Amino acid sequence: MTTFTITPTTTYSLRESAEFGFGGRAPDAFDGVMRLAFCLDGYVDQVGVELRQDATGVVHGTAHGAGDHRVDAVRAQVARALSLDQDGSGFGDVGIRDPLIGRLQQAAPGLLPPLFYSPYEAAIWSVLSARRPATQMAQVRTRLSERHGRVFELAGRRLAALPTPDQLLRVTEFPGLTDEKIHRMHGIARKAMTGTLDVDRLRHIGPEACDEDMRRLKGIGPVYASLITIRAVGFTDVLPADEPMLLELVGLHYRVDGPVSRAQFEEIAAPWRPYRTWASVLIRAASPRIGVVGAGHRGG
């Protein structure tokens, strides 16, 4: 086991991350520990991580399955998955410029967007969940990870990491997966092995080029390409202008008649820069806490 710490640059709550639900996973009941299991960047091995937060806000991590020589890589990836790799020192100022965001920050103090562990895992989830119930496919992913990935014992609970690309390419059939889904997952695995899904590369080319790149993956359409770009690479200032439930909530908050257009959304969100992604996630997650619930949140 190796240990590390992450010091947030803005108000941050590990409980909010654990109970948020992320990466196609259901929210966890927080018992003081957030448990993670994932493929390390580079996609050749896996790690399990226990996270705890002390009274000063510092996050303490214990990594299983990674030697001391990999601890910096583990720390960096965990920080990215929790949106703690970015300078968040100006996020509080967004709440001053826009009182609505300030009110949501007070309702959900320390809520930052938890991300997929990596673009590879986001792309695999996109193929798994396409046109299938998310809960059902999350169960399939868990079984796939337990059988072909790596299982860790983390603070008294078992958690399995997704198979690495090399492990996944050895899977030729699996209950709950069609031949076509396996074929598409194999294509993503091969792309991951060539570096196409490396975070550093995708951040370097920027969100628009990243989105275009992701659309070239077989089985990844515009919605899932946006999911990978916004919820896996870790851009903080991408405006999710194609999310219907978000647009509905923005319309309710800012009293816009009818659906919010892209132009209206961009104007409303201007004060949120350079954290438009974070503010958008905050609106989706925290609006019910102040009594604003869209039809999508009501199940309508």
Image (cartoon, grey):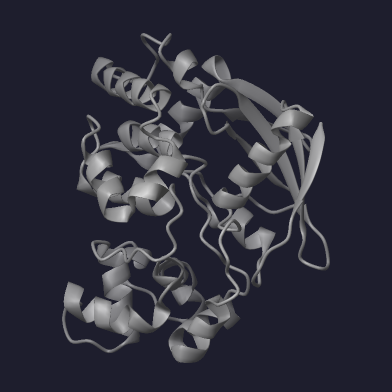
Q: Residue most toward the front? A: 204
* Residue nearest the viewer, comparing 93 with 109: 93
* Residue nearest the viewer, comparing 44 with 299: 44
Q: In terms of image quadrants, where is residue 269?
A: bottom left
Where residue 212 sits: x, y (%)? 22, 45
**Quarter holding the N terminus?**
top right
Image side of residue 188 versus residue 84, left or right:
left
**Quarter holding the C terminus?**
bottom left
Residue at position x 74%, y 42% in the image? 50
* Residue nearest the viewer, comparing 44 with 25: 44
Whether residue 102 is visible: no
Image side of residue 220 versus residue 284, left or right:
left
Residue at position x 21%, y 41% in the image? 221
Q: In terms of image quadrants, where is residue 297?
A: bottom left
Image side of residue 84 versus residue 245, left or right:
right
Where residue 185 sits: x, y (%)? 34, 23
Residue at position x 82%, y 68% in the image? 56
